[in-house]
Image: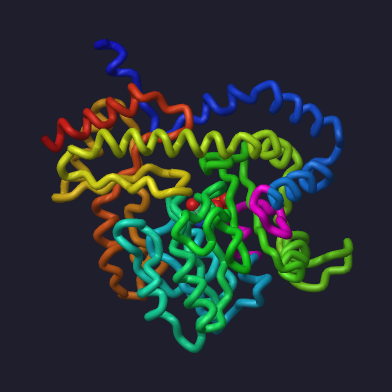
């Protein structure tokens, strides 16, 4: 017991998943290496059609990263300088970065303290005559309030591009008019990331843009390949943002197992939730239907978050703070001087704990015990 108590617990362990598919992944790697198709090609097309079917969308365009999916999505919508896009200040930098990099203006709307997702009331307040699109983020794998967000979009004639980088496989719950549908599939566009730590992770960078609109899909395909539908006939300034065949092949092995893995994450989250129920000072995330727990993120009240994290470190337990600096407070936006009180409070309270599909109950128990000892 004593020695076991000191085994380190990482915040994420990618080992068990790759071990469980080693044989198939090895075969895919050999198939791709022998095929001579390394960028794009049949493996990528195969993945695109399987992903489109899984997500329930008409078109899926494989790209080099989730960031590119956002950038190319915004460009495909025709958004540029002078346009405003509303997004969350409590997200990974790539969400607002994608808006600024194409010359548009990122406008932040504060989040809801319980879901960590953009608050529709704040979105409504942020709409101006220049607003062109809304970019909700399904943070940590929890579906954002798309009923309200799509209402606002409809009323103001705005496009919606969902940042679903953290929510591959998440579905809207029974109370939503989108019930049962996948996050990323209900806006004009949905952007996904296959960064290795995401729920559907590649062994390198990768991304996907999905839509039901054939024109948007065609535009995205054009942009990912230097603005050319036909080689050497470049129609516009684009990007080099194609997906590698080896990543597509790996993702084709992983996609059929995603639901089971997400289910296992949800079960792990439920166990944490039960065990945290009587730990005072900890607010555990609600296990809402369809949430895929890309992160399991608690709130620690009373200014004791850093103390809790130090105790975990002492016990060789990994944890992360997503995100320590609200986007609007990043050095790059130093001139903004805006205040987003909910996000600012969350940045001082949140702590993401170890979670992956095969995490063992004993490890989770140790995490909870270590935290409850500090807060007792
Ligand atoms: C990971 C992530 C991205 C960017 O994806 P990359 O593949 O790393 O470029 C965008 N938005 C959010 C919310 C993310 O978590």
Residue name at image x 18 percent, y 38 percent: 279
Using residue 369 as the reference point, say whether residue 184 is left or right of it. Answer: right
Q: Is residue 342 magenta?
A: no
Work out which residue is located at the far bottom of the displayed protein and give it: 129
**Residue segment shown in magenta:** 54-72
Q: Residue sitting at 73 percent across and 64 percent down? A: 217
At which x and y percent is residue 354? Answer: 37, 34
229 on left or right of 281? right
Quadrant housing the C terminus: top left
| Nearer the observer, 303 or 372 | 372
Q: Can residue 62 be seen in this view?
A: yes
Query: Residue 181 appears in which quarter of the rendering?
Result: bottom right
Residue 82 image position (x, y, % from top left): 55, 84
Task: Quadrant for the N terminus, please.
Answer: top left
Residue 92 appearing in the image: no
Residue at 83% across, 46% down: 41
Image coordinates of residue 43 in percent, x first then y, are 79, 41
Quadrant for residue 59, please give it: bottom right
In the figure, residue 66 lies in which quadrant? bottom right
In this rendering, the answer to whether 336 lies above or below 352 is: below
Q: In this view, does 133 lie above or below 48?
A: below
- Please tell me which residue lies in front, 219 or 240: 219
Left or right, 123 with respect to 95, comes to left
Say if the magenta span includes residue 59.
Answer: yes
Q: Where is residue 200 in the image (x, y as percent from the top left)?
A: 58, 42
């Amino acid at each position: 017991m004593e020695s076991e108590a000191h085994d380190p617990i990482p915040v994420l362990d990618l080992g068990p998943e790759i071990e469980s598919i080693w044989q198939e992944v090895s075969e895919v790697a050999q198939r791709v290496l022998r095929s001579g198709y390394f960028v794009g090609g049949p493996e990528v097309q195969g993945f695109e059609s399987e992903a489109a079917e899984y997500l329930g969308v008409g078109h899926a365009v494989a790209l080099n990263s989730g960031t590119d999916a956002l950038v190319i999505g915004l460009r495909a919508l025709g958004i540029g300088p002078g346009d405003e896009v509303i997004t969350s200040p409590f997200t990974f930098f790539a969400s607002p970065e994608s808006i600024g990099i194409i010359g548009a203006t990122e406008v932040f709307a504060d989040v809801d303290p319980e879901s960590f997702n953009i608050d529709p009331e704040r979105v409504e307040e942020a709409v101006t005559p220049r607003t062109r699109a809304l970019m909700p983020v399904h943070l940590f794998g929890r579906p954002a309030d798309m009923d309200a967000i799509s209402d606002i979009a409809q009323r103001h004639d705005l496009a919606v591009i969902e940042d679903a980088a953290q929510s591959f496989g998440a579905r809207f719950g029974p109370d939503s008019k989108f019930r049962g549908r996948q996050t990323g599939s209900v806006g004009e566009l949905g952007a996904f990331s296959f960064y290795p730590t995401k729920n559907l992770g590649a062994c390198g960078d990768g991304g996907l843009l999905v839509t039901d609109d054939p024109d948007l899909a065609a535009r995205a395909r054009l942009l990912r390949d230097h603005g050319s539908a036909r080689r050497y006939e470049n129609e516009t300034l684009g990007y080099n943002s194609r997906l590698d065949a080896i990543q597509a092949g790996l993702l084709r092995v992983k996609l059929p197992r995603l639901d089971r893995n997400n289910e296992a994450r949800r079960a792990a989250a439920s166990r944490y939730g039960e065990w945290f129920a009587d730990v005072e000072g900890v607010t555990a995330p609600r296990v809402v239907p369809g949430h895929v727990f890309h992160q399991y993120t608690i709130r620690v009240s009373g200014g004791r978050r850093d103390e809790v994290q130090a105790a975990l470190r002492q016990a060789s337990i990994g944890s992360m703070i997503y995100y320590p600096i609200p986007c609007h407070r990043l050095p790059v936006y130093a001139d903004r001087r805006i205040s987003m009180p909910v996000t600012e409070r969350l940045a001082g309270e949140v702590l993401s704990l170890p979670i992956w599909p095969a995490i063992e109950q004993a490890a989770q128990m140790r995490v909870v015990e270590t935290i409850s000892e500090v807060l007792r």
